[in-house]
Image (cartoon, helix red, strand yellow):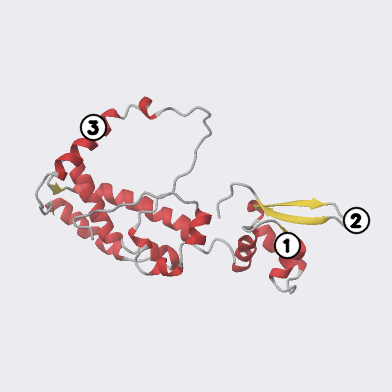
């Protein structure tokens, strides 16, 4: 048994692994929508990254240390919204309450409480005992980024169902054209199959393997591609 505990997670995962590992039950039972989904990507390749000691963030670290220390030793207290914050939150409440369709909606269907909690964090970091308009506004901007990150990770209508079937199979390793035909029980016309491969052409590469007869076409995923 643990009392007065507060647990948080900071996790890193690729989109491909996330889609494979997050179960339907996790998406729909209120587990996945407790996370703030934040997309990050490398913007450039740097052989010798700057060390954390050279970033000039000492003042920010000290501010964070003071904020967490001051809150830790306070007696339990209730934080309220200022008049301006309450009015703005009321203005955006209906928008926040609207759910998106599909998986995107399932993993973001907690926008209302998430924004209040984020605003509370900003409030305490500022050393305030009342959530201000600026805290709600900052929380809304952060949530918007998380919401769009979740859309990038979970929205499913980017590719057709048959193209997704090919991508899922290729995720296990390269396939010959014969193998891909077998995914559809050999009932896929070569022109239709060509259209499917064109749909995902930016994700795949085709190489040729020498045989005693006609060269074999091998289809594989391009390295470092996120699905």
Which disc number belongs to residue 212?
2
N-terminal-most mark, 3 or 1: 3
Check the image and name the residue furthest to the top: 54
Task: Give left or right: position of 99 versus 214.
Answer: left
- CA–CA distance between discs 1 and 2? 25 Å
The answer to which of 66 and 189 lies nearer the viewer is: 66
CB of mark 3 within 8 Å of CB of mark 1?
Answer: no
Q: Residue at x 47, y 29 (%)?
A: 49
- CA–CA distance between discs 2 and 3? 70 Å
Q: Could you tell me if residue 126 is visible in this image?
A: no
Q: Residue 106, percent across and down?
A: 39, 66
Q: Residue at x 32, y 49 (%)?
A: 142
Q: Residue 65, percent across and down?
A: 22, 36
Which residue is under mark 1?
Answer: 194
Which disc number belongs to residue 59?
none
Which disc number belongs to residue 62?
3
Task: Give left or right: position of 222 versus 227.
Answer: right
Label 1, secondary structure: give it: helix
Label 1 or label 2, whichever lies nearer to me, is 2
Q: Residue at x 52, y 35 (%)?
A: 44
Q: Residue 24, percent across and down?
A: 45, 69
């Amino acid at each position: 048994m643990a009392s007065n505990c507060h647990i948080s997670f900071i996790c890193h995962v690729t989109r491909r692994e996330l889609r494979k590992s997050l179960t339907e039950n996790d998406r729909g039972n209120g587990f996945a929508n407790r996370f703030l989904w934040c997309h990050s990507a490398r913007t450039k390749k740097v052989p010798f990254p700057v060390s954390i000691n050279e970033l000039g963030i000492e003042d920010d670290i000290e501010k964070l240390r003071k904020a967490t220390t001051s809150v830790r030793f306070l007696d339990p207290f209730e934080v309220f919204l200022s008049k301006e914050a309450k009015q703005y939150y009321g203005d955006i409440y209906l928008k926040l309450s609207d759910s998106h369709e599909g998986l995107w909606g399932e993993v973001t269907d907690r926008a209302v409480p998430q924004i209040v909690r984020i605003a509370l964090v900003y409030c305490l970091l500022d050393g305030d005992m009342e959530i201000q308009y600026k805290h709600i506004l900052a929380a809304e901007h952060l949530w918007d980024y998380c919401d769009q990150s979740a859309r990038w990770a979970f929205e499913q209508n980017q590719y057709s169902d048959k193209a997704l079937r090919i991508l899922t199979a290729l995720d296990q390793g390269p396939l010959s054209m014969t193998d891909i035909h077998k995914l559809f029980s050999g009932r896929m016309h070569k022109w239709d199959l060509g259209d499917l491969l064109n749909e995902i052409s930016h994700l795949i590469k085709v190489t040729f393997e020498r045989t005693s007869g006609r060269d074999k076409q091998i289809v594989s995923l391009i390295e470092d591609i996120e699905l």
